């Protein structure tokens, strides 16, 4: 699965790095725009699917935090178009669409899934065309709808109880995934454990950071080797020097590293220092901005949280379901 929607929509929360921020304490509800589009492809055009994704995300945010990507609890919004009819009584023809909204929350296991909670509601929409009527119906999913709010609140309680009862089982799955070097699944599992699961929350927290460190080191070694090869090409082929320096800077800016003492990152940073005098003005400015960002400890903590989440969010369950919270 492509991660474009996941990367764009990262939330600004913190993990253990900022105890003053309670966002990481919440039970995480996840939703994927790509999956919403795919699941509703038969009934909705891309624009309406994106609107449905946005609307449901807003609903989730009323009772917690909507995070975008994958975890072990997945929410799937689906809109079925029951009927479409025309009303010619007025001056202009009006198209009426009767639809039904379904919300499903699943707990995804290895190769299977279990439904935690479901909700459905009929909604009407109108417009001059079928697509307009369907879009209007989605707009009629009211943010203050007490039934939908109650659904998410009750679902959170059920998930909370699940973690309190099965937290050790979740960590067992995460450690099994780590043993198989399935870093994304391991982080998705451990990172999803809320603070309310006090029995193993700290263990889950430590595990997610441990897996993150292993993942980063493996990834960084490959990136540092690639940067060295680009530097060699730049030195041996003057005509391509600036082109390959651009590639090196781009890799450096995208490195998922927030520990300045990391052995691999230090190698990459030294390489940048070695070629710094050879950069053109634009490249020097980019590199200076990158160095400044890396000197800000608060920013580094944010980067680590987002990197951990991004890795976990890249996990694609083996079952074809979508994400909830």
Image (cartoon, grey):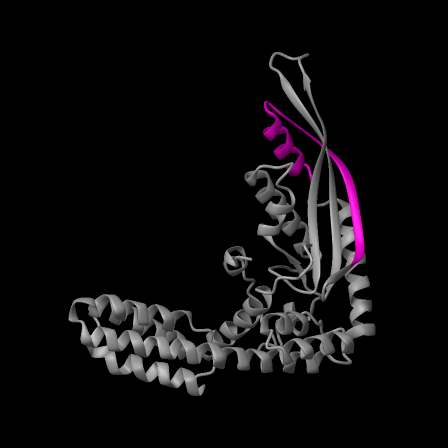
The image shows residue 55 at horizontal and vertical percentages of 63, 46
Q: Nearer the viewer, residue 289 or 311?
A: 311
Q: Classify residue 71 by image quadrant.
A: bottom right
Left or right of residue 203, residue 18 in this image = left
- Residue at the image point whose x is 56% and y is 72% from the top: 308
In the rendered structure, the answer to whether residue 156 lies left or right of residue 138 reads right
Query: Bounds of the magenta span?
Result: 114-142
Residue 119 position (above or below residue 83): below
Q: Residue at x 35, y 68 (%)?
A: 250
Q: Position of residue 192 (x, y in %)?
A: 68, 69
Horizontal side of 87 relative to 131 (left or right) equals right
- Asked whether 76 falls inside the magenta stretch, the response is no
Residue 122 within the segment the image draws in magenta: yes
The answer to which quarter of the image holds residue 174 is bottom right
Q: Is residue 283 above or below residue 68?
A: below
Q: Position of residue 135 (x, y in %)?
A: 61, 34
């Amino acid at each position: 699965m492509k991660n474009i929607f996941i990367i764009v929509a990262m939330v600004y929360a913190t993990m253990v790095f900022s105890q003053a921020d309670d966002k990481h304490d919440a039970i995480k509800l996840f939703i994927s725009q790509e999956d919403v589009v795919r699941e509703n492809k038969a009934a909705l055009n891309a624009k309406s699917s994106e609107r449905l994704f946005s609307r449901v995300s807003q609903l989730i945010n009323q009772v917690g935090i909507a995070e975008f990507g994958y975890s072990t609890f997945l929410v799937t919004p689906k809109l079925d178009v029951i009927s479409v009819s025309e009303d010619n009584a007025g001056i202009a023809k009006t198209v009426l669409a009767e639809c039904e909204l379904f919300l499903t929350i699943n707990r995804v296991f290895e190769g299977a899934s279990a439904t935690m909670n479901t909700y459905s509601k009929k909604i009407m929409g109108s417009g001059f065309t079928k697509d307009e009527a369907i879009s209007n119906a989605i707009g009629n999913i009211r943010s203050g709808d007490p039934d939908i709010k109650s659904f998410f609140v009750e679902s959170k309680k059920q998930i909370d109880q699940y973690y309190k009862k099965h937290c050790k089982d979740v960590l067992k799955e995460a450690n099994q995934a780590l043993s198989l070097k399935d870093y994304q699944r391991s982080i998705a599992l451990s990172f999803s454990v809320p603070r309310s699961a006090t029995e193993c929350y700290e263990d889950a927290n430590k595990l997610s950071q441990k897996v993150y460190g292993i993942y980063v080191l493996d990834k960084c070694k490959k990136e540092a080797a690639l940067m060295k090869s680009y530097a060699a090409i730049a030195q041996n082929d003057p005509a391509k020097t600036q082109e390959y320096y651009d590639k090196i800077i781009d890799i450096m800016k995208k490195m998922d590293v927030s520990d300045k003492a990391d052995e691999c990152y230090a190698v990459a940073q030294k390489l940048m220092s070695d070629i710094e005098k050879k950069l053109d003005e634009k490249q020097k400015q980019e590199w200076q901005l990158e160095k400044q960002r890396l000197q800000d400890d608060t920013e580094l903590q944010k980067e680590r949280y987002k990197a951990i989440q991004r890795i976990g969010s890249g996990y694609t369950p083996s079952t074809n379901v979508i994400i909830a919270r």
